[in-house]
Image: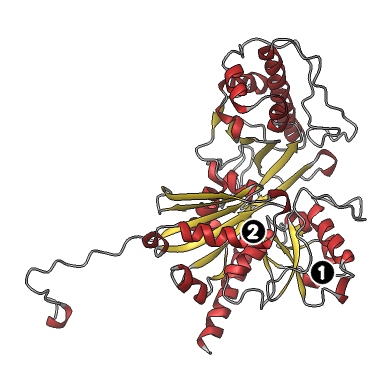
């Protein structure tokens, strides 16, 4: 029998207190045109979603991000807000700024679409357009004279610092997905040679694994917003990678095609593939690599020619089992980067038939062939051939386009289970580093699993770096 002190008698007629509600995870997506929030439970069921658009998307900055952050977190029902125990976020890849330790920006934000030239070694591997923007800002601001207390940050780094207890007091923290285009070497969880040779190398953020803990929410901020004091912040990823996490693609052979303004392809591979001459690079995805390539062709060209209602109406009249005689190149302007890197390639949007159904048929067929050539290029470079292609983006629901794509690819095409980057960020908050494949695939001709154990060990080490930073801050808080 339990001791008398272990039992508490309730007053006559009183009901026992209900058990506490289970904790939930939140994900934020700071994208090109606006920001979004998604809250999920332990079974990955969506409990709440909200979104807003930036007033000036092409000229967004820290004030826009901060306003969106407070509005979205404040939009959650108070009882749900009090149950959030983990939060992560994703942001646009390659968007950078310089900011002081007080979080105030030192100069403008340069977004991912704002190209800047830089004199980097020609034999480097991986993209460096984010580093080029940081270097340009550094040179424009006269370097250390005006940036003496400033830190180099990516969009996601600044947002996490705005939420985190301690902010930038201990420097910036970045995940290796957001840091890739600034010269990070994800295989070593460190800055690569080109980034390390810059005059501002000591101002670059510390690199951690996506999904690792990077601190807790600022206590005063938690009280003001009604968030739990112990809310964990989980290192994030890029918006495109978060959409991949949302899609359910989790093994080599599953491709994801994003049919948005541009046509972006992603494919999990056991091998890292970096081919700048073809516009191909790889993100580290646990024990695997997420190989990516993006054409400039896509929905932006279709919207130059038809509005959404007209696109839907014409699509229903296309016979996707027939071939179009048109040979079109649906680019928005001169130059292509993937599957062929050709800066001189010109759009070819003519001849335009009198019948718009025939014209749209030719455009969609051309896009399907570009997609097929893209996966062929990835396979040629060493990625596994896809056996199924998942679709996300505005074109995923177009039945005629889907069938044209199946014919061009010779593969089944189906819609991804979810496509929202905010949902992917919420999964990352919920699962941490377990959101990524933990073991590499076993090859039939191998007596032992493919080499990937060291990769997982390094990922665990990088995850512990975030945990240690969290512990150091808790100890400093307790000693005050």
Name the residue at the bottom extreme: 480
Mark 2 vs 1, N-terminal side: 2
Q: Nearer the viewer, residue 123 or 200?
A: 200
x then y, percent, for residue 158: 66, 65
Q: Secondary structure at mark 1?
A: helix
Residue tagged by mark 2? Answer: 64
Give the secondary structure at mark 2. helix
In what quadrant of the picture does the N terminus appear? bottom left
Give the left or right position of residue 166, taking residue 110 as reference. Answer: left
At 44% across and 57% down in the image, what residue appears? 76
Tell me, for residue 76, which label it has, or none.
none
- Report crowding for label 1: few under 14, some 14 to 19, many 20 or more residues within 10 A (C-alpha): some
Instruction: Find disc 1 in the rendering and name its residue.
Output: 201
Inter-mark Cα distance, 2 to 1: 28 Å
Residue 427 in view of the camera: yes
Identify which residue is drawn at 72% across, 49% down.
Answer: 58
The foreground one among 434 and 72 is 72
Residue 143, position in %: x, y? 88, 71
Which residue in the rendered view is the most extreme toward the front? 55
Q: Quadrant of residue 307?
A: top right
Observer able to see residue 288: no
- Image coords of residue 469 (percent x, y): 60, 75
- Rendered view: 287 above or below 360: below
Snapshot quadrant of residue 11: bottom left
Q: Judge by depth and name the residue closer to the eye, 333 or 277.
A: 333
């Amino acid at each position: 029998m339990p001791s008398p002190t272990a039992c508490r008698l309730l007053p006559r007629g009183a009901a026992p207190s209900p058990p506490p509600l289970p904790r939930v995870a939140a994900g934020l997506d700071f994208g090109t045109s606006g920001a979004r929030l998604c809250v999920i439970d332990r079974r990955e069921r969506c409990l709440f979603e909200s979104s807003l658009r930036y007033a000036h998307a092409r000229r967004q900055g820290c004030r826009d991000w901060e306003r969106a952050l407070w509005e979205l977190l404040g939009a959650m029902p108070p009882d749900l807000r009090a149950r959030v125990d983990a939060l992560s976020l994703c942001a646009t890849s390659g968007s950078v700024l310089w900011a002081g330790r007080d979080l105030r920006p030192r100069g403008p934000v340069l977004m991912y679409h704002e190209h800047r030239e830089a004199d980097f070694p020609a034999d480097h591997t991986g993209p460096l357009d984010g580093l080029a923007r940081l270097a340009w800002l550094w040179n424009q601001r006269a370097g250390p004279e005006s940036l003496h207390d400033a830190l180099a940050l990516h969009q996601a780094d600044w947002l996490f610092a705005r939420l985190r207890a301690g902010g930038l007091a201990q420097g910036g923290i970045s995940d290796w997905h957001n840091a890739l285009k600034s010269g990070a070497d994800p295989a070593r969880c460190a800055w690569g040679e080109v980034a390390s040779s810059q005059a501002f190398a000591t101002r670059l953020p510390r690199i951690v694994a996506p999904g690792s803990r990077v601190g807790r929410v600022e206590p005063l901020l938690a009280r003001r917003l009604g968030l739990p004091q112990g809310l964990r912040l989980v290192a994030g990823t890029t918006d495109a990678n978060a959409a991949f996490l949302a899609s359910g693609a989790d093994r080599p052979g599953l491709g994801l095609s994003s049919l948005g303004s541009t046509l972006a392809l992603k494919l999990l591979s056991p091998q890292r593939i970096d081919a700048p001459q073809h516009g191909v690079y790889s993100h580290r995805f646990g024990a695997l690599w997420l190989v990516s390539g993006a054409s400039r062709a896509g929905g932006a060209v279709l919207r130059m020619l038809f509005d959404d209602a007209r696109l839907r109406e014409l699509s229903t009249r296309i016979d996707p089992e027939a071939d179009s005689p048109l040979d079109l190149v649906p680019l928005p302007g001169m130059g292509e980067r993937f599957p062929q890197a050709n800066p001189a390639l010109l759009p070819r949007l003519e001849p335009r038939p009198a019948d718009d159904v025939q014209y749209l048929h030719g455009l969609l067929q051309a896009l399907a062939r570009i997609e097929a050539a893209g996966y062929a290029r990835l396979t040629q470079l060493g990625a596994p051939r896809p056996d199924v292609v998942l679709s996300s983006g505005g074109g995923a629901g177009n039945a005629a386009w889907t069938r044209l794509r199946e014919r061009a690819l010779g593969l089944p095409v189906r819609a991804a289970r979810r496509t929202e980057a905010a949902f992917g960020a919420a999964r990352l908050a919920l699962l941490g580093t377990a959101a990524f494949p933990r073991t590499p695939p076993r090859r039939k001709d191998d007596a032992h699993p493919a080499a990937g154990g060291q990769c997982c060990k390094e990922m665990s080490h990088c995850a512990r770096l975030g945990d240690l930073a969290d512990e150091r801050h808790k100890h400093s808080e307790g000693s005050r």
